[in-house]
Image (spheres, rainbow, N blue to C red):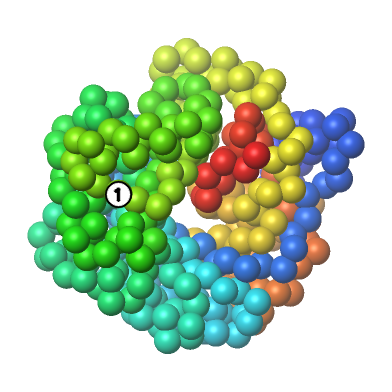
Amino acid sequence: MDVASGVDAVRADFDAAIAARGLTQLRRSAPRTIQVNVGKLCNQACHHCHVDAGPKRTEIMTRATAERVVELIASSRGVKAVDLTGGAPELNPNFRFIVESARILDRAVMVRCNLTVLFVPGMEWLPEFYRDNRVHLVCSLPCYGPENVEKQRGRGVFEQSIDALQRLNRLGYGEGLALDLVYNPVGPSLPPPQSELESRYREELGTNFGIYFDRLLTITNMPINRFAHQLHRWGRFEEYMGLLVNHLNPATVAGLMCRTMVSVGYDGGLYDCDFNQMIELPIGASGEGRRLTVWDIDDLGALAGAQIATGAHCFGCTAGAGSSCGGALA
């Protein structure tokens, strides 16, 4: 299968599904957020990870690419927020450079933190660095108790996560500095209602550990990469895809993150979202399937109006209450 026919094949079903509900093809608004995936190196190897990140991954953003990303942030006046992800973004040697440069440019900075990275040898400086740069932290914690967390993320992760959150609270996070938590289902199911689960998290974490936070974000597991492989091992991939397709909610489409965000890969490639990046579906994918990079554009605002590349995984963002990097959509 060539690139063009491959792109058309993965796009067709989702585009047809939203068209059948009277919705037009997805197109971009002016980008407000640039999400930068600095690489796949991580101190964890979670079962649900759509990045396939882990301790042995070597894909990592170079200094030259990081400097070009900062140049693009500076020239893209409409971009107000920089969202750093990975892997564990903090393990990239250019992490401090990107954060400090974005703050000098007066952009808000968000970091997607797995919490346990604070205990990696040599990373003891992180909490104070977050505080001093007023970084908005979005931290993974798939349950308020140890069983589900360790089932998904590994032994000992829950205890370290609680220690990390308590330390962040002492520095002002959750009380002036933004601290959000992220819930992913352990298995092939949709997240429960976000507001109800947030209340339970507040009660359990507050009562048992004295932890406070700003918001809980519920995110659907995407049927790609590591989670897709797990579904196939369970013999439940088709079942899960059916769940997502049958719960398509048209009310979520207007708020999809791909409309106002651009995703940048560790090698400088440009994508509509981090999920498209992981299946190598480039931004503006068309019949020719040409991939744009940070060296091909000087202002991300030029992407406004472009068609968004879609695939079967897009049903994950539009099922039920919807899912995005900012949690539920409806």
Residue 93 x %, y % = 27, 71
Q: Which residue is mark 1?
A: 212
Q: Is residue 66 above or below residue 51?
A: below
The quarter of the image holding the N terminus is top right
- Location of residue 159 (image quadrant): top left
Residue 65 x %, y % = 45, 75
The tally of labels here is 1
103 or 314, which lies in front?
103
Q: Is residue 117 visible?
A: no
Q: Residue at x 49, y 77 (%)?
A: 107
17 or 329, which lies in front?
329
113 or 279, which lies in front?
113
- Location of residue 283 (image quadrant): bottom right
Q: Residue at x 47, y 63 (%)?
A: 83
Q: Secondary structure at mark 1?
A: loop
Q: Residues within 10 Å of mark 1 (few under 14, many from 20)?
A: many
Q: Is residue 244 visible?
A: yes
Q: Residue furthest left?
A: 121
- Location of residue 24 (image quadrant): top right
Q: Residue at x 85, y 41 (%)?
A: 23
As drawn, is 118 to the left or to the right of 240?
left
Residue 141 x %, y % = 32, 41
Q: Is residue 27 above or below residue 103?
A: above
Q: Is residue 244 above or below residue 30?
A: above
As drawn, is 116 to the left or to the right of 66?
left
As drawn, is 282 to the left or to the right of 166?
right
The quarter of the image holding the C terminus is top right
The three-letter code of the residue at mark 1 reads Tyr
Q: Residue at x 44, y 60 (%)?
A: 37
234 or 145, which lies in front?
145
Residue 271 x %, y % = 60, 58
As drawn, is 327 to the left or to the right of 133?
right
